[in-house]
Amino acid sequence: MHKVKVCLMVSLLAATAVTPLQAQESVEQRLQRVEQLVNSRSLLDMSQRIDALQAEVQQLRGQVDEQQHTIEGLRSRQRELYLDIDRRLSRFEREGSAAPAAPADTQKPDDAPPPVDAQRLQQEREAYQEAFDLLRQLQYAQATTAFRRFLKEYPEGRYAHIAQYWLGEAGYAQRDFKQAIIDYQALIANHPKSPKRAEAMLKIGYSHYELKQYSEATAILEQLIEQHPGSTEAGQARSLLKQIRKKSG
């Protein structure tokens, strides 16, 4: 009887025993499942990161598009502003250059103004318009060259003071403040009756401010306020002076 029990136990153990090969296969299977799980998590993490990056890129693209739209709007307004200023200056020039005629009974042949060379005036106007069109297209370097060529050809021309003003504006727009100061000062010195005199003085002040030349900026701004006390430019000059005092104080 004892021998029968022993045989049964041996048979049971043999039936339930795990061979080394079976144990090895089980470990490999578990490793495969772990690897699959790790890979799945890595792919999930990578997918989530890619989604986040794509969302960030889309957001940045939206911001870039918005900024480009804003810049284009500013450029459009700048072009329209130039055109409006040109109209005003041209009208001022036409009205200012129209001298009243003397009464018929007092006018003498010797008093008559010299005849205007219509052809040269037309050439001057076309040369000015060519330079201004470049400026309106915001092609500052090309416009600067054209305006300097214009002033060399027509230094005493009807549009000389307007061309000189635009030279200052072109330099200022390009943040070439040193050159802008030179051109604005030329407008003030050579064309004291220009309607842009006060603005030229203000821009000189701003240019010195950008160059951190606060004493020079203060001097021209105070001169502007004294000479044009009730102007819009004088109000802007007072505001800039406050900023200068805060920085230098």
Image: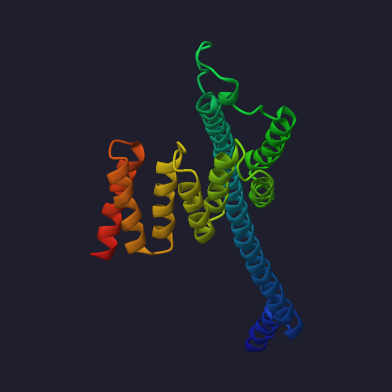
* Displayed quadrant of residue 212: bottom left
Horizontal arrangement in the rendering, residue 184 relative to residue 49 (left or right): left
Q: Pick out the residue farthest to the left.
A: 249
**Is residue 225 placed above or below 43 in the rendered structure?**
above
Horizontal arrangement in the rendering, residue 242 relative to residue 28 (left or right): left
**Is residue 171 placed above or below 33 in the rendered structure?**
above
Q: Quadrant of the C terminus?
A: bottom left
**Is residue 140 placed above or below 44 in the rendered structure?**
above
In front: 126, or 49?
126
Residue 5 in view here = yes
Q: Pick out the residue farthest to the bottom.
A: 3
Q: Pick out the residue farthest to the top.
A: 105
- Across and down, in percent, residue 179 comes to 54, 58
- Across and down, in percent, residue 91 comes to 54, 26
- Across and down, in percent, residue 225 comes to 29, 45
**Total of numbered circles in the picture?**
0
Its colouring scheme is rainbow
The residue positioned 43% from the left and 49% from the top of the image is: 203
The residue positioned 41% from the left and 59% from the top of the image is: 208
* Displayed quadrant of residue 52: bottom right
Residue 66 in view here = no
Q: Quadrant of the N terminus?
A: bottom right
* Displayed quadrant of residue 115: top right
In front: 183, or 133?
183
The residue positioned 59% from the left and 23% from the top of the image is: 112
- Across and down, in percent, residue 224 comes to 33, 47
